[in-house]
Image: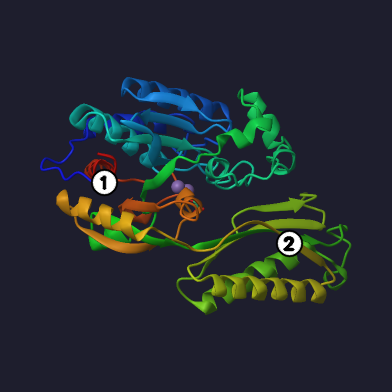
Amino acid sequence: MAERRQPIQIDSAMLQHYIEALGSIGRQAGGGIVRPVYSAAWVQARGQLAAWMRAAGLDVREDSVGNLFGRLRGVDDSRTILTGSHLDTVPLGGKFDGTLGILSGLVALRALREQAGQPLRSLEVVALCEEEGSRFQAHYWGTRGMLGLIGADELERLRDDRGMTIAKAMRAVGLSPERYHEAVRRDLDAFIELHIEQGRILFDERVDLGIVQAIVGLQHQWVTVKGRADHAGTTPMHLRRDALQGAAQMAVEITRLVEQDGRPAVVTLGKWEVKPGAVNVIPDEVSFSIDLRHPEEEIKRRLATAIRDRCQAIARERGLVVSSEITSDSPPSSMDAALQAILISSAEACGASWRAMPSGAGHDSQEMARHLPTAMLFVPSVEGRSHSAAEYTTQEDAARGATVLATALHQLAY
Ligand code: GLV
Ligand code: MN
Ligand code: MN
């Protein structure tokens, strides 16, 4: 590991330009970004990134699931230190979530190539795909491709809202889904992901950086409540089997159960479908999502069971039928202690204040950490806003994060 007297100087103006330029791809009228995996906006953003990677002197390639890589070859090119994050956004998301990790890695590798020359081990920056699961509910798809965790059945089973399979969407952007297993990597020694905090701890405490210790456990469910469609004007209230009234009561009860458990348990019911969806027809089928998070797996499971039991009881009381499918389930994940120590010493070498903290948001790192040494560096989110167009990190904070990332990569690869 090489110590370095002069910190690596990243180009803050270039980082800022990249953030703005990438943030304009997929941007909607209100400012939010829509850039789901394998969409036209995603293809355009990836093309732009590839051009910037080439300009930085990196070797560029994509893998069989659509992850994009820029590589700075080491003296020993057989092993890799990987950095980066995801390129896809939530619907109407902000320009920092995921993107900042890719762009910080890109300017860090550029600065390292120019200021420190060839590393001993290869360094690589990656733009990962479908972390958010916004299009196919295929969370951490790019990361799972690299770790060999994609199931062959997913290719034809996972569909977007318009019914298109993920295999078809991959073909539409020139990928060959049947070659998904070729994305597997066996050369990775470490993964370091820089990300915005997406909460307000660093902002409120005026701390420069967060060193993530662990990422919360997260379960997603898709709940379907079935009742009976009837006439809105002629069916007395006591004779209805209204799927929406049942689902609404479930929503109130789920929220109450989790609130009763107290912090840090959180639950969100963010997506709803009501059928047949007419003003004068009693809804006969309602589906909604549950996003349940807790840093302790046992408590997450206990809450999930309590939610399921309560929903079944409500369905019985109202003559409805409820079913639920677990669409994603990740236990809590711990970050690598040695890599955390390198991030801390890098922060201190750059004169940045830091604190250890958990992540309430899900990240590619939580999957990576189960297979290789992984660590995360958080930069402050102004007022903690994220997953919205209001997401913002100052130029100074972004540049500081990228500088510390570059310093840590230097320690690891030179
Ligand atoms: C990803 O951003 C998540 O935490 O849902
Ligand atoms: Mn996100
Ligand atoms: Mn993210």
- The residue indicated by pointer 2 is 324
Residue 64 x %, y %? 58, 30
Q: Please tell me whether residue 232 is drawn above or below residue 8 in the rendered image.
A: below
Residue 278 x %, y %? 78, 49
Q: Nearer the viewer, mark 1 or mark 2?
A: 1
128 relative to 290 in the view: left or right? left
Q: Circle 2: is it few (<14), some (14-19), or many (20+) Cα within 10 Å? A: some
- The residue indicated by pointer 1 is 408
Q: Is mark 1 within 8 Å of ligand 3?
A: no
Residue at the (56%, 70%) spot, across then down = 300
Amino acid under label 2? Ser
The tag earlier along the polypeptide, 1 or 2, is 2
Q: How far apart are marks 1 and 2 (CA)?
A: 44 Å
Amino acid under label 1? Ala
Residue 50 x %, y %? 42, 24
Residue at the (28%, 42%) spot, across then down = 409
258 relative to 401 in the view: left or right? right
Residue at the (65%, 31%) spot, across then down = 179
Q: Circle 1: is it few (<14), some (14-19), or many (20+) Cα within 10 Å? A: many
Q: Name the foreground residue: 337 vs 238.
A: 337
Q: In which quarter of the image is the C terminus?
A: top left
Quarter of the image holding residue 77? top left
Quarter of the image holding residue 292? bottom right
The answer to whether any part of residue 97 appears in the image is no
Q: What SS does tag 2 mark?
A: strand
